[in-house]
Amino acid sequence: MPARDDPTLIDDAAGYAGTFRDARGRQLEFVAEGRRLFVLHEGRRVPIEAGDAGFLVRHPDFSRFHLVFGRAEPKDPKSTVVEVTWGGDWYTNARHAGPAEIATPPEWQAFTGHYRNENPWVGSLHVVVAKGRLTIDGLVPLEPAGDLRFVLRDEEHSPEWIAFGDVVEGRAMRMKLSGEDYWRFDEPEAGPRAPA
């Protein structure tokens, strides 16, 4: 068997380094050392690994979502890194040109949250607003299609859709995806405790 690639070796790690802040003043700071990238968290350098959908931070405070970096020119992989998202949290650096916040329809807040299905092959999903778009786990954009229904836009011609239902006191209690029902699961808020 060939040796497994080291997930902590990241091409152009220095391109991701820097300080990123959100609209509330919280920040995430990344440092590079050769081909390795670290996030500074609670006074420690925590290693970052390359994943299929983004970057993984091997720390409990970051376990829920991937870090996803964005570039000034999204279609140019060599353009400058200007932003990073973690779930619904959006951070930008000094090179970001554009708004610091993006308005979203207030009714989307009814859909955000954690939804679970007890089938082990299905699992759970988090619906969050990331950069002004409703998304699954901050990775898969959802495009409104009317009647509490959204189309998944991780692929241009995806036939998959998601629908929300049983809205009680402004919160959807149920979500349907690929024929499977997911039910809202309330949990304590978690995430990186970025410095204010």
Image (spheres, grey):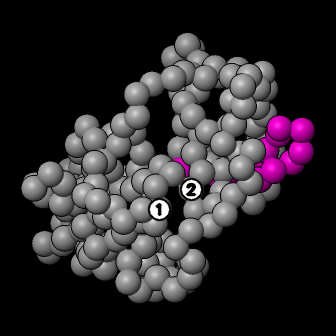
Query: What is the total number of numbered labels drawn onto the structure image?
Result: 2
Q: Is residue 22 above or below residue 44?
A: below
Badge 2 or badge 1: first in the primary sequence = 1
Type of amino acid at the residue the image marks with label 2: Ala
Q: Please tell me the numbered disc located at residue 90.
A: 1
Element type where label 1 sits in the image: strand
Q: Please tell me the numbered disc located at residue 195.
A: none
- Residue at 86%, 48% (x, y): give it: 145
Position of 148 with respect to 168 (left or right) is right
Would residue 170 be counted in the magenta stretch? no
Q: Is residue 92 above or below residue 117?
A: below
Query: Which range of residues does the magenta coloring cover?
Result: 138-153
* Quadrant (top left, top right, bottom left, bottom right) of the C terminus: bottom left
Q: Looking at the image, which residue sits at the far top?
A: 118
Question: Percent from the top left, x then y, of residue 119?
Answer: 57, 14
Question: Percent from the top left, x then y, of residue 186?
Answer: 51, 23
Question: In terms of image quadrants, where is residue 11?
Answer: bottom left
Q: Is residue 139 visible?
A: no
Q: Residue under label 2, please give it.
A: 130
Label 2 close to label 1 by CB (< 8 Å) = yes
Position of 94 with respect to 44 (left or right) is right
Type of amino acid at the residue the image marks with label 1: Trp
Q: CA distance from mark 2 to mark 1?
A: 7 Å
- Along the viewing direction, whichever of 16 and 77 lies nearer the viewer: 16
